[in-house]
Amino acid sequence: MKKKKSTLWFWLILLLVIAILAIVITTTMNGTNEVISFQEFLELLKEGRIQESNVIVKYSAFNTAIIEGYFDNGNGLQQFIVHTSQNLVNDSGILDQLNIVAYQGSATASIIASLMPMVLMIALWVGIFWFMSKQGGGIGGGQNPFSMGKNRARQTKSDVKFANVAGIEEEKTELVELVDYLKNPQKYAAAGARAPKGVLMEGPPGTGKTLLAKAVAGEAGVSFFSIAGSEFEEMFVGVGASRVREMFTDAKKAAPAIIFIDEIDAVGRKRNNGMGQSGNEQTLNQLLVEMDGFGTNSGIIVMAATNRADVLDPALLRPGRFDRVIQVSLPDIKERKAILELHAKGKKIDESVSWHRVAERTPGFSGAQLENVLNEAAILMVREGRDIITIKEIDEAIDRVVGGPAKKSRAMTLQDKDVVSYHESGHALIGLKLESASKVQKVTIIPRGNAGGYTIMTPKDETIFSSKQDLLATIAGYMGGRAAEEIMFGKDKVTTGAHDDLDKATNIARRMVVQFGMSELGMTKYLTMAEESYGKIEGTYSDATAEKIDLEIEKILNESYEIALKIIKENMNTLELLAVSLKTLETITAEQIDYINKENKLPEEVLREKEKYEEEQSKIDAGEIIDLSLDDSED
């Protein structure tokens, strides 16, 4: 930060000095001189208004001459200057008339003096131009302003190996032959085969697409050129196409090599049908030409990553360009376990930690999130002064990744605590009693982010597809919190705590109707996945159809809510036990929840803390604010 500030001040001072010098030199050179023509000079001389003793004639380069002196303007002496040619001075005979000699001036000095103002002004504008580029203000994006079309790909040697990538074994298998081709291209040429010119990796963020590309380069020991799609274009149309050409030229010189384009959808989106071409379209066209090759890119493989392959131009995905598309999915439970074990190396982990159990608690986590979990756990270990990472730090790290840091200092009234306890117990109860519902892993009423509490539920079996029964059970689970509030406190006293639950439930119900054909409207699909992702709902279908869709969504939500109400009414004792456990311990685990469900009584640890909690509660007046961090019980 200090270096950036010093650079900023340096450029500001330099530009100010250049501007002042330009003004001073220009003013000094012209001074108060009145520029007159040679003919006007001769007339003033004839009229006797020239002070002949003070006239100086200077000869300079390129047959030029400068005459300087003073003349009487009626109010006093006025300095003048005349720019003319040496021939006119010699032919006029004024040198003899004035009885002076013309001085031979320095041609170099004369040229520099005459060009100095222009040079300084040019330097001023170059300085401004350079300053803007260095500040990343849009001109060149921090590059040399005179080479904006140059290659911006970063050339490195990757030290990442396949051993550094865990959890995506099938994807690695697809890429092993690329390594073999880069090492032994003659073997493939002899067999009449060629390696794919391009490999597109598609998948959610954090699943290891960039890491895979680096691993291929590291295993093959070849140059690795990396660039983001957004870096091709900045301000000027045509710059991106030039950078593509430069990038492939540099890669050919360094061949064998890998060119990796991250977020290629920023430059490879589908072209429109307009007559004109935007900068992105020119860049895309150049990329298509380079990959298809009016020449051969021997030893060069283009790898790219995107989260949105559906928006890419079809010309990019045809054979001869991106020949191979690899789906890099979120890891399943076995893959999550492998990723956790990989990132646990080099960290002091308690031997009692079960990576299988941790993997069970992290469905939907990407590889990057799992790495972040263990990093957060290590930070928590240091913060708490421990020498080893236990399941307690890992559990808290998972919660931090999901919902943010715990806010135990957030004040909550006894009434709020009561409401949150029953609300979260309602979610958990649906998970326990409804078939096809997800398994309850943890329930807490400790606030995180904007949530007063939350329930973590994971699928009992991780499958590729979700059935209609699964989706309805998920919606009922989201409705459990509001249903518990209504039963315990009445319809008029339900709270706003269910706003996020209702939002998620509505989104699932909408997709069931408009995308999955899981309603009485039939098998019609009203939105593409891209349209649904961008929320393009209005105007996609007629108002009459929109009304039918809304009615179907409302029907699904209402039926799911009735199911939640029915389950809670039938299991009031379990709801009470869950709520008491939450109010006592603030967080209950899957083991404690299963014990309550099977034994229909409170666990021993809850009973031990319950008496202390009730004693403390009796000392607090109704409605008084309490601090959740006061009850720091161990579980």
Image (cartoon, helix red, strand yellow):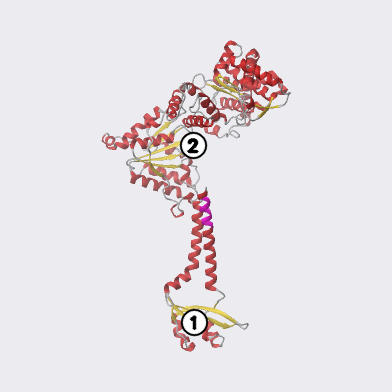
Residue 240 in view in this figure: yes
Task: Kindly indicate the quadrant of the structure image that contains residue 296.
Answer: top left
Give whichever of 413, 560 is nearer the camera.
Answer: 413
Q: Secondary structure at mark 1?
A: strand
Give the numbered dot on residue 126. none
Q: Secondary structure at mark 2?
A: helix
Residue depicted at x 64% and y 26%: 630
Quadrant assignment for the C terminus: top right
Callout in the foreground (1, 2)? 1
Residue depicted at x 57% and y 26%: 508
Query: Magenta span covers which residues?
Result: 4-12
Residue 603 in view in this figure: no
Question: On screen, 238 above or below 54?
Answer: above
Q: Few, some or many C-alpha atoms within 10 Å of disc 1 (few <14, some 14-19, many ≥20)?
A: some
Q: Which residue is mark 2?
A: 311
Task: Kindly indicate the quadrant of the structure image that contains residue 500.
Answer: top right
Instruction: Looking at the image, tell me whether mark 1 or mark 2 is earlier in sequence order.
Output: 1
